[in-house]
Image (cartoon, rainbow, N blue to C red):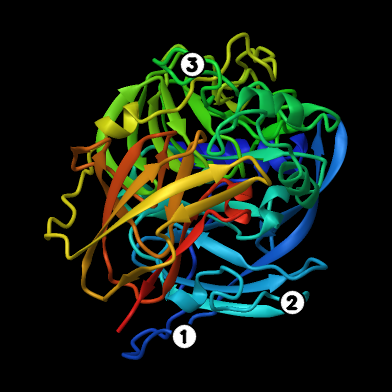
Amino acid sequence: MNRREFLYGSMAGAIGLGTSATAFPIRARAQAIGAAGSSEAPATAPRRLAVAHRTIDVNGKAARVFGLTQPDGASGLVFDAGGNFDIALTNNITEPTLIHWHGLAPPWAMDGVPENPAALLRPSEERRYTFPVGPGGTHWMHAHTLQEQNLLAAPLIVRTMEEARRDEQEVVILLHDFSFTPAEELLAKLKGSAPAAGGMPMSHGAMGHGAMKGGTGQMTSSGAMPMPGHAMAPGMAAMDLNDIDYDAYLANDRTLDDPQVVPVEKGGRVRLRIINGATATAFTIDCGALSGELIAVDGREVQPVTGRSFPISMGQRLDIRLALPKEGGAYPVLALREGAVERTGIVLANTGAPIRRIAAKGDVKGPIIGLDLEQRLRALARPSVRPVDRRFALKLTGTMAGYQWGIEGGDKIEVKRGERVEIALSNMSMMAHPMHLHGHHFQVTGINGASIAGAVRDTVLVPPMARVNLAFDADNPGRWPFHCHHLYHMATGMMAYVAYVP
Ligand SMILES: [Cu+2]
């Protein structure tokens, strides 16, 4: 029995723990039903996926949330690399919605951002999506609307033949931030917040945050602190980390009060596929006693980086390889909320190993995420080294007055098919922005003025006052969203488009 079979067997025994215990088992492959001996392309039936209502338990209370489920109840999708993405998507909820395939490069019409160009999917409407799924990678899918806040997100894993053959257990972890308050209300509170008293318009001031906290009980003051390495002068802008204090932080729909326990083998090998599906929360993955090897970011391989903790901003993915000790035990994999004590996670455990209770709040705050790791990342495959044909310089801006965010210069990013394009991002605000380009992967080519042959990604973090350059080949015509993956920054203006012109 190899580790993959071991997982199947063990998961069957875990069903009684509740639906989310088996939320993300490894799924069987899509079956191509071809006529044997026929020279014609096989006629294939699409796989079915539904946007559905679900009820989960959060802190002992029932929460009615969304989900993306297959007919057998499995969450999300798994594909073979190089195959076809062929999905019949049905809207089984009572409101219009649409799903974005984050990390894939579909034709523009199938990208899943409402009215760009496809219309929303009405209740009961079905729509088919067919395009090459592309190379292997850890991706995900989510609503490109405020519905994302209510867990309308799921894993989308593309697995290579080599990965499928490996004697290595896959464990998918989808992180989320959860509030019993509807997203519309959270957004209204943010927009209604007072500007920083005497603060600079570009900043979140500590004063402003204090004012913001008053009355609502939702907003946080925990994140306001001086920028690292800078003395806090009177009236100086404060770096801000978290806009919203959530009711819970979830890993595969569960909190640390009742975490998912994944059965593993003594001395086994595990590949974590971690997705940060939170709308407004960055985490640091803490492998605890285990040393991890980071092998891919945003579904693209990097030269392995060894460590015990790895940052992950909204929209990003991390593939981390773990070697489990031979003596056995229980191994928590935690996600620490940035600049705060809250945490979530799962537990890898051998059969019979005692599982220690882990508090949902730690003793120390999660690290502040910068570009230390990004600076060290190098793409494994040598990406395009063509000279740049076209350059853009964009400024990320924001003000707490009315909670408005923006991309200066983002109204005219026009490219031609076949060009190599470079975008230089300067963050002029005091919040970090994970910037996501649809329809393409890009390479990180510069950090704070220094050139690097960095990771190939689809979402890169630009911390306060930092500069990040990225480059990509314009090979997928359309009008592609380029935006901050903080849901409430995007909803209040931090959205631009890379538009192909003839
Ligand atoms: Cu942002």
Mark pair 1, 3: CA separation: 48 Å
Q: Is mark 2 within 8 Å of ligand 1?
A: no
Give the vertical position of 359 relative to 294 (above or below): above
Q: Nearer the viewer, mark 3 or mark 2?
A: 2
- Please determine whether, in this image, residue 50 is positioned above or below residue 162: below
Q: Who's the residue at 19% across and 39% down the image?
A: 452
Q: Quadrant of the N terminus?
A: top left
Q: CA distance from mark 2 to mark 1?
A: 28 Å
Farthest residue to the top: give it: 363
* Image quadrant assignment for residue 83: bottom left
Left or right of residue 50, residue 101 in this image: left
Q: Amino acid at mark 3?
A: Gly
Q: Which image quadrant is residue 68 in?
A: bottom right
Which of marks 2 and 3 precedes in the sequence?
2
Residue at the spot of label 2 = 122
The answer to whether 272 appears left or right of 260 in the picture is: left
Nearest the viewer among 465 and 146 is 465
**Element class at badge 1:** loop
Q: Which mark is residue 375?
A: none
The alpha-carbon separation of the residues under discs 3 and 2 comes to: 45 Å
- The amino acid pointed to by label 2 is Arg
The circle on residue 288 is 3
